Image: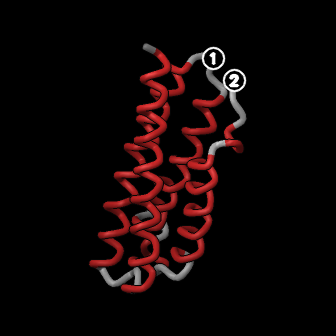
């Protein structure tokens, strides 16, 4: 069992989630159960899956949760693009959040590779 707070990628994902919550506060009320909920859920799911994976007993199990977190990262990336294209995110907000989400995805990919190589 690992402490998820020791993972740099968890810290980056958590910080990204906090920022996503801040920027989505200004989304229209009619999006509260739509895009606002979806984008927040996808962001929070990245760090949550890392935390859950750290509670598992093996690198293989941890690796499975890293892959799930990567799926949530891809979903977040799309939701950020959609929010930008719908003018719910300003160009500045999008140009801040999108590269941060991409950085988290790269970190997740590196962690996944490291876990796979440790299992061999």
Residue at (58% x, 70% y) in the render: 19
Q: Identify whether 56 is placed above or below 11.
A: above
Q: Is residue 55 left or right of residue 112?
A: right
- Callout 1 crowding tier (Cα within 10 Å): few <14, some 14–19, many ≥20: few
Q: Which of 39 and 69 is in front in this view?
A: 69
Discs 2, 1 touching: Cβ within 8 Å: yes
Q: In this view, does 39 lie to the left or right of 54?
A: left
The label shown at residue 18 is: none
Q: Is mark 1 on a helix, strand or loop?
A: loop
Q: Nearer the viewer, residue 43 or 30?
A: 43
Q: Identify whether 63 is placed above or below 29.
A: above
The label shown at residue 1 is: 2
| x then y, percent, for residue 98 | 39, 68
| x then y, percent, for residue 92 | 42, 85
- Callout 2 crowding tier (Cα within 10 Å): few <14, some 14–19, many ≥20: few
Whichever of labels 2 and 1 marks the residue nearer the N terminus, that label is 2
Residue at (54% x, 21% y) in the render: 59
| x then y, percent, for residue 69 | 46, 42
Residue carrying label 1: 57
Q: Is mark 2 on a helix, strand or loop?
A: loop
Q: Name the quadrant of the C terminus.
A: top left
Residue at (63% x, 38% y) in the render: 51
Q: Which of 15 and 113 is in front in this view?
A: 113
| x then y, percent, for residue 37 | 48, 61
Instruction: Write down the quadrant of residue 85 in the picture.
Output: bottom left
Q: In this view, does 91 lie to the left or right of 57?
A: left
Residue at (58% x, 17% y) in the render: 58
Q: What distance separates the C-alpha of mark 2 from that of mark 1?
A: 6 Å
Q: Name the quadrant of the N terminus.
A: top right
Q: In the displayed image of the protein, which residue is found farthest to the top?
A: 120
């Amino acid at each position: 069992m690992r402490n998820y707070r020791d993972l740099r990628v968890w810290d980056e994902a958590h910080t990204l989630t906090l920022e996503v919550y801040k920027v989505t506060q200004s989304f229209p009320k009619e999006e509260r159960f739509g895009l606002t909920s979806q984008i927040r859920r996808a962001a929070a799911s990245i760090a949550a899956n890392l935390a859950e994976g750290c509670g598992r007993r093996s690198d293989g199990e941890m690796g499975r949760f890293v892959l799930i977190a990567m799926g949530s990262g891809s979903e977040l990336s799309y939701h950020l693009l959609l929010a930008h294209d719908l003018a719910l995110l300003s160009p500045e907000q999008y140009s801040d959040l999108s590269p941060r989400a991409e950085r988290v995805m790269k970190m997740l990919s590196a962690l996944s590779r490291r876990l796979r190589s440790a299992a061999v």
